[in-house]
Image (tube, grey):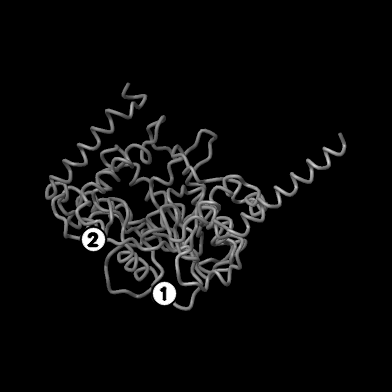
Amino acid sequence: MRHYFIHFLIAVLLLTGMLAGFNWWVDPYAIYRDSEALLQQTQPILVMNERVFKTVGLAHIKADIVILGTSRTDIGIGREHEAFAGMRVFNLATFGQPIQETRRLMETAVEQGKPRTILVGLDFFAFNMLFDPPSDYVEENYSSRRLYSLMLSVSALSDSWTAVRRKTPAAGDCCYADGFRTPENLSLIAGQYRKRFTGNERMYLLEKYLPYPECRFSYTSKDERNSMDDFRSMVRLAHQRGIDLRLFISPSHARQWETLAVAGLWEQWEDWKRQLVRINEEEAGKAESFPLWDFSGYDEVSTEAVPMARDGQSVMRWYSDSAHYTPELGKHIVRRMFTEDADTWGLVLSSANVDAHLVKLRAARERYRVTHPQDIAEIESVAREVNQVKHCPARR
């Protein structure tokens, strides 16, 4: 009996070693390779899971500038900016990144990577504590033992096996070694804009603004955690560590703000901006508050015409769908925030101007609704479809 037990134990140890060795060798999440060598390569890396790569690996590497936020920041802020020249810049933004995850990543980067500057894209839906984190969010990613547990993970083995069977990036792969996303070929979107816009708006109404089953927006979770406290912690940490924190409210197409309004969240959206301003100034105390830029609203950029469904040639300059802006617009964001740019797009919010700014935004919205009746009709049609299938408690 003892003889069989010893053989069994040896077999288990061999299999465990083979599993760990194979996952380490393939490294589907790009977390075991030499980080310096990885950062030197110019081609996209084959990463099976963006969150693991950025949380377990990239956030721990020494950086000059770190970028945080949702997929809007992930997709829209590209690598090529004069303000980034000579700097080691990592993009830690991820799809559906809730503000509590943004805070955790910032804390990790500050402790491990020690950046001098942190750029944060702020999105209203990410502050909804009833919005479930994305399916690939794993709290264990912040554990110091995560590197080792993934070596023994069966799911990592599956990803490793998938990785060795292909040689080119595919859906689910994300980016370059510095976390910046591989750019989308916008010419392939021509003829699909109306479908992409309505699909994006439907998704926000179904899943992000008023997520099921609560079907409402709340800064407070069921266990009494508050998303505005996460934001406050980020601002406080930046002051304590002497970090140059640059905050911006992401731009989206005007149709996205109409989608937010049809969800009944316009007043809460305005209140969110006031709270951001208040917290930012409260945490500054007698020091200078961090710049809080607002690039959202209704202007020449956000009201860019959406090509009709039959138009298979036109390519939008600033947006790829209702929520996501293009890297070309991202260049304007970075230039405005880091240089003395004569452009007047965007506004640094403060307690002295936020209310007047919101009044102007409402007026601009009314003008948009008058001049874009087809866009408004499409959004309202999508909202009716969502209401028929969502079965929220208040609508039963």
Residue 225's place in the image compared with 36, above or below, is above
Residue 337's place in the image compared with 108, above or below, is below
Which part of the image, by quadrant, shows the C terminus?
top left
> Which of the pair 180/215 is nearer the observer?
180
Determine if residue 43 is in view. yes
Mark 2 is surrounded, within 10 Å at the Cα level, by few (under 14), some (14 to 19) or many (20 or more) other residues, namely many
| Residue kind at label 2, given as amino acid type | Val
Q: Position of residue 201 (x, y in %)?
A: 28, 43
Determine if residue 118 is in view. no
As measured in the structure, the alpha-carbon distance from the residue carrying label 1 to the one carrying label 2 is 22 Å
Nearest to N terminus: mark 1 or mark 2? 1
Residue at far right of view: 2
Q: Position of residue 122 (x, y in %)?
A: 41, 54
Mark 1 is surrounded, within 10 Å at the Cα level, by few (under 14), some (14 to 19) or many (20 or more) other residues, namely few
Find residue 128 and report its image quarter. top left
At a point 42% along the width and 47% down the height, the residue shown is: 126
Left or right of 326? Residue 235 is right
User: What is the secondary structure assignment of the residue under circle 2?
Assistant: loop
Label number found at residue 301: 2
Name the residue tied to disc 1: 83
Left or right of 141? Residue 261 is left
Q: Position of residue 304 (x, y in %)?
A: 20, 58
Which part of the image, by quadrant, shows the N terminus?
top right
At a point 17% along the width and 43% down the height, the residue shown is: 376
Q: Position of residue 3 (x, y in %)?
A: 86, 39
| Residue kind at label 1, given as amino acid type | Ala
> Which of the pair 362/97 is nearer the observer?
97
Quick check: marks 1 and 2 in contact, CB under 8 Å?
no
